[in-house]
Image (cartoon, rainbow, N blue to C red):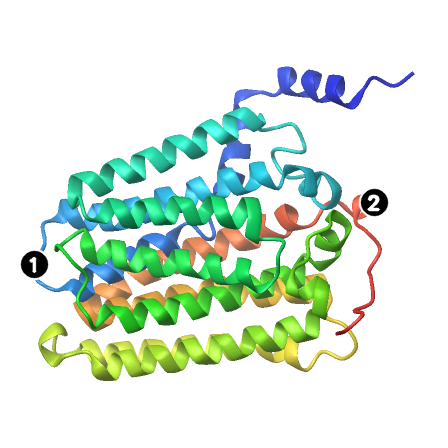
Amino acid sequence: MAAPRSTRRTHLRTRTSLPTRLLAHLQTWRPYTLWYPGLVGLAGAALAGGDPPARWLAVAWAAPTLGWIAGHYLGDWFDRRLDAISKPQRPIPSGRLNPRAAVAAGLVCAAAMTGLALWANWRSVAVAAAAAAGIVAYSRVLKGRGLSGNVMRGALTALALLFGAMAVQAWPPWHALPFALAFWSHDTASNLVGTVRDVDGDRDGGYATLSVRRGVRRAAHTAAGLYLAALATAAVALAVTPSSASPPDGPAGAAVLLAAAAGCGGCAFAPLLRSPGRITAPRALRAHQVLVAERLVLAAAVLATGAGAAPALAVLVPCLAVSVVTQARMRAAYEFPPPPHRPAPVPDPGP
C-alpha cells in the first residue's frame, strides 16, 4: 500500500540536497521580477532630489526588494494548498522547500526591510509596516476576492516609490504622488493579467478572482483600461514635475522611455484583446512576460525624470537583460506543471 502523502513528503524533504534547496529559494524569489521593486524605490529617491549619499540610495533599492522577496515567500506559503492542485512543481508543494523555512525566510526579509526603514528615516517605518500588512492581506484574504486583491497588490508598488523618496528625505515630494498613482494602476493591471493566466487553477481552488467570476475577457479588458490609465497618469505626472526637480535631459529621456513602455504594453495587450472565444494560459503568460519587462522601462522613465537619462539607462539595461534571460529560462516551468499534471482547458464562461 502506498505511503501517506505526508510521509512521502517527509522522505522527499530529508533527501533534498543543499543545491536543490538553494534552487528552490531562488525560484521562490522569481529573479525575473526581482529588479523591479528596487528600481521603483530608486526612482522614488531620484524624485526626492538632492544629492543623497550612496548608502541611502542602497536602502531605497534594498528595502523594497526585501519586501518583495518576503511577499513571495509568504504568498507561496498561503497559496501552498492551491499550488498543490494546479502547480505541484513549485518549491513548497513539491517538497523542495519546507513550509516553515519559507515562513521563516519571509519574516527575516520583512524584519530586514523594517530595520532598513528605521535606519534611513523613522517615518518610513509606517510605509514598511503598511507594505507588510498589505502583503498579508493580499495573500491571506484578498487574492481570491476579485478586484480588491488586484488593487491591494498594485498598492504595494506605490508604497515602494514613496519609501524610496523617504529613504533620502523626511517626506516624499508632492510631485512623486502622481507617479505613485501610476504605479498603483499599472500593477493592478499587471496582477489582473496574472489572474487570466491562472484562471483554471484558481477556479479549481475556489478563488473568486475577477477572471473566475466574470470571465477572462472581462478581466483582460479591465486590465487594459487600468494600464491606459497608468500611462495617462504617468504622462501627466511627467508634465507637472517642476523643472527644478529634473536635470536638463530628464523630461526628454523620461518621455522616450515612457513611449517605449507604451509600445511594449501595446504588444502585451493586443493579443489578449483580439483573442476570440477564450484566452489561453500560455497566451496570458506571454502577455505577462512582456509586462514584466515593460514595467522596468516604466520605472526607468520615472528614474530619468529625477536623475537624467544616462543614469536611468545605466540601471535599466542590466536589469532588463537579467530579467529577460531568467524569464526565458525559468518562467514557464515555474508557472505550468509538466504536461501530465496540467488541468484540461476550461472554456471561458463569460460574465
Q: Residues within 10 Å of mark 1 (few under 14, many from 20)?
A: few
> Where residue 275 appears, x then y in whole percent?
71, 78
Q: Give how far across and how far down residue 319 sits, in percent.
A: 37, 56
Write the residue at 71% across / 38% down: 84
Secondary element under disc 1, as helix, strand or loop, is: loop
Residue 58: percent from left, percent from top: 21, 46
What residue sits 61% from the left and 65% below the top? 286
Q: CA distance from mark 1 to mark 2?
A: 56 Å
Q: Position of residue 24 (x, y in %)?
A: 55, 33
Verify CB contact (< 8 Å) between mark 1 and mark 2.
no
Please state, as top left, top right, bottom left or bottom right, where the N terminus lies in the image.
top right
Quarter holding the C terminus?
bottom right
Nearer-the-camera pick, 136 or 224 = 136
What residue would you read off at disc 2? 340
Residue 15 position by quadrant: top right
Q: Residue at x 24, y 50 (%)?
A: 60
The three-letter amino acid code for the residue at tag 2 is Pro
Q: Earlier in the sequence, mark 1 or mark 2?
A: 1
Q: Please tell me how crowded label 2 is: few (under 14), some (14-19), or many (20+) other residues with Cα within 10 Å.
A: few
Question: In the rendered structure, which amino acid carries the disc numbered 1?
Answer: Asp
Residue 300 numbered tag? none
Q: Nearer the viewer, residue 88 or 189?
A: 189
Question: Going 27% across and 76% down the picture, which residue do you hit?
Answer: 254
Across the whole image, how many numbered discs are drawn on residues? 2
Spot the residue most to the right: 1
Q: Is residue 215 above or below residue 54?
A: below
Residue 294 in view:
no
Which residue is disc 1 drawn over? 51
Residue 287 lies left or right of residue 188; in this view the side is right
Q: Give the mark toward the camera: 1 or 2.
A: 1
Q: Would residue 162 be visible to someone looking at this image? A: yes
Secondary structure beneath dot 2 equals helix
